[in-house]
């Protein structure tokens, strides 16, 4: 694939996206506010705002008068423009969230999944039921939906096929095509790592930083990589599979079928395996539900006298995590590393300080000294939020306002 | 660092660079040829060519008449415009190569380095002597030099300092500033991984592919990463330190002071350590000079009956190398992986097929199936060539023809 060349349409597209995201975050802003926040010229902001008003994306609200000077017209996103749906197909559930065009959540639904069943029909059915349920919850009719974004774990796009690299997921694009045809809605698909990166790019630290990595820590782990403000997709859309890069050649077996992957050490089942290595008889060593196991670790650490086996498990996990992040710093050298996912939210306070020390020691030279490692301030389902952002972006591309290369979807 | 926003100057800059690189490679071309090669419109090519002629970068040559149609004016780079010097500061030598503005080599010089001495003064003195020697060899006077590009191993740029991460290299920018002041020439510094990537971007496979990785295999190893046609520098200019990412947590000691780095397995001393593990008594197990050791392996493999210990060493090295490249594919997901450096040139025929099999097996899912893994067709000192390219780019920026973000240098 040859290098994409820039055109003046790309510049205008970027300006529109900057104004749009600034307004989504600020909720309301004057043209002057937008000029300040985006760093664009006031002439560019005026032009872009006029275009977005003409397209029904932005509306002018009440006019306020400050202490001095002229009255100011306040702008906001036209929430009535329509709705987007973000869908997170996770191990044990499918969650769909409906957002209005201002990206405020207006309804949601969740459908349980049997994590051992992964046929195309079963997953597609779950997506469809979750979307329909979320639209009902929001009281939004299908014809008001601008687009649906679906996150599928481990997405890989090859030249002629779209497939899924999670081991047992062998189904191809036909499954999702069926959903799209049933729903009759524009649809974009992406993997959860890139979905989280998209959410951070619009709502998180990414707004301030040109290059960052979001690490999702849950059952699986992976990275969303943003370079110069763009999500890194890679040749087959599988960039960011840091969870399946090696920490220990020929090390622990990973559920992907290979050995020694990062995920086998810092995914929730990997952390449990570490606890079993520390104390095979520990009451939590064989806890059934991963998320409960992680929460039990957090509860133990918060107690007055922490369980020494749990403390040692956290120490080893920080060593694994810091070493694995050091590899990302060696290769990508980002400014910011953001931890997300339920493991990060439950254990972040304990993991981050230890992990930071390991990271600085294990990364080449001084390359990690200035890295800002922190837990994401975003909460809720960042995967669904990110997919709603992607669906909105795709809509803006379809109506000719953006040229950004969002995934072609289906 | 906030995201850099595009301007229309960036678009014009990219077009100029495209025309320039196409003409450097083609040596001579008509405007129509350039239109075909760059994919730019013929109007853009005409404008850009006029600008580059005005700046003395391109000249119009003889007019040829084809079998049919109008006579065609042939363009070429104005080699007389001036000279650039590329300098490779390696472990055991400093090599400087002088190129004319068409990037044809016109002279060179090499100065031996004691690899155990790395004071700023010593290295700076070596750079200066090599540059002066190369200019003498080329018969080029100093006032004809447009710029000098110096590659230093393991460059790291932090907010206020430029330092070097190769363990024993503790000197800071003062050393290179002294050289620049002595030579009185514009200077740009960069690390060798990015220099090789720059050479590949102008002369190699990079011209066809938007995202690729060049792996330099020698005493040290590392990656030059190109994404969407841009060299990835990272927050502290140390992106691509793949050689110091982990292959085996707590594995072999690496000369960087940490354990288990990729370089400790696939750098030339690492390959020798593998041979010692296979057969501690092997005559080559303690060979003194690394490059001779690698060449001896190649000679053994080319012999009628290859030495089983050498064959096993190559098998294990391919396993290490393929696994380590799989990590890059997991994280970056490039289209092309190009091997360079004297290990790649000597052993590539033996390493590549085995490494490819390991890569496909070890990378997540099908993500490496379509990766084009090959030995660079470029020969000679790609580091010096790449630094000459960087010096030329910097010159074009300084005269206002490019906006590309080349390193700020010193």
Image (spheres, coloured by chain):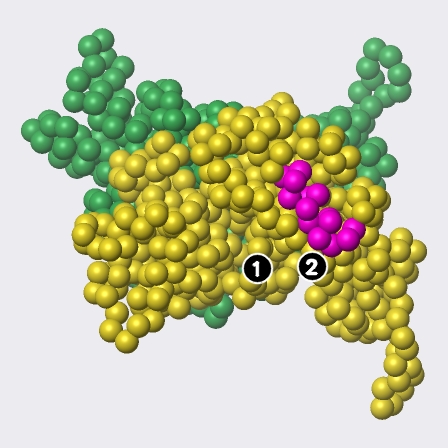
Chain colours: A yellow, B green
Between B258 and B82, the residue placed more toward the observer is B258
Residue A351 visible in the picture: no
Residue A270 visible in the picture: yes
Magenta residue span:
A127-140
Residue position marked by numbered label 1 in the rendering: A380
Is A213 placed left or right of A148 in the picture? left
Is A25 part of what is drawn in magenta?
no
**Relative height, residue B175 to residue B245 (above, below):** below
Task: Give the quadrant of the C terminus of chain A.
Answer: top right
Between B167 and B53, the residue placed more toward the observer is B167
Q: Does dot 1 land on a helix, a strand or a loop?
A: loop
Residue drawn at point x = 42 percent, y = 57 percent: A343
| Residue contact at pointers 1 and 2, CB within 8 angstroms | yes
- Expressed as whole percent of the image width and height from the top left, the position of residue A348 reads 41, 64
Between A152 and A53, the residue placed more toward the observer is A152
* Real-space Cα separation, disc 1 to disc 2, in angstroms: 11 Å
Query: Which secondary structure class fits the magenta region best?
Result: helix
Residue position marked by numbered label 2 in the rendering: A105
Characterize the local packing of mark 1: few (<14), some (14-19) or many (20 or more) Cα atoms within 10 angstroms: few
Q: Are marks 1 and 2 on the same chain?
A: yes
Between A138 and B362, the residue placed more toward the observer is A138
Residue drawn at point x = 35 percent, y = 55 percent: A293
Is A132 part of what is drawn in magenta?
yes
């Amino acid at each position: 694939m040859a290098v994409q060349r820039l055109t003046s349409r790309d510049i205008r597209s970027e300006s529109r996206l900057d104004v749009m995201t600034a307004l989504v975050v600020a909720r309301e802003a004057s043209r002057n506010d937008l000029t300040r926040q985006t760093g664009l010229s006031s002439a560019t902001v005026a032009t872009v705002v006029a275009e977005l008003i003409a397209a029904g994306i932005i509306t002018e609200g009440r006019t306020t008068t400050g202490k001095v000077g002229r009255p100011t017209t306040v702008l906001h996103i036209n929430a009535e423009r329509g709705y987007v749906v973000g869908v997170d197909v996770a191990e044990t559930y499918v969650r769909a969230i409906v957002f209005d065009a201002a990206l405020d959540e207006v309804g949601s639904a969740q459908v349980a999944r049997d994590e051992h069943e992964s046929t195309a029909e079963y997953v597609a059915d779950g997506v469809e039921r979750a979307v329909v349920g979320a639209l009902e919850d929001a009281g939004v009719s299908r014809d008001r939906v601008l687009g649906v974004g679906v996150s599928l774990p481990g997405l890989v796009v090859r030249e002629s096929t779209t497939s899924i690299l999670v081991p047992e997921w062998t189904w191809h694009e036909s499954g999702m095509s069926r959903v799209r045809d049933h729903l009759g809605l524009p649809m974009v698909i992406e993997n959860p790592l890139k979905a989280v990166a998209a959410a951070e790019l619009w709502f998180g630290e990414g707004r301030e930083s040109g290059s960052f990595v979001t690490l999702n820590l849950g059952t699986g782990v992976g990275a969303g990589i943003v370079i110069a403000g763009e999500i890194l997709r890679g040749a087959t859309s599988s960039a960011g599979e840091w969870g399946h890069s090696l920490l220990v050649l020929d090390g622990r077996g990973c559920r992907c079928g290979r050995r020694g992957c990062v995920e086998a050490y810092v995914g929730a089942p990997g952390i449990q395996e570490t606890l079993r290595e520390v104390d095979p008889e520990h009451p939590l060593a064989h806890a059934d539900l991963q998320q409960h196991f992680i929460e039990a670790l957090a509860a133990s650490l918060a107690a007055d006298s922490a369980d020494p086996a749990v403390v040692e498990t956290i120490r080893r996990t920080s060593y694994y995590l810091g070493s694995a992040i050091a590899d990302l710093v060696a290769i990508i050298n980002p400014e910011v590393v953001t931890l997300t996912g339920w493991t990060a939210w439950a254990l972040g306070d304990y993991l981050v300080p230890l992990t930071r020390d390991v990271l600085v020691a294990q990364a080449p030279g001084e390359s990690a000294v200035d890295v800002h490692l922190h837990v994401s301030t975003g909460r809720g389902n960042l995967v669904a939020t990110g997919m709603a952002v992607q669906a909105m972006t795709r809509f803006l591309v379809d109506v000719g306002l953006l040229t950004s290369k969002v995934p072609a979807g289906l």
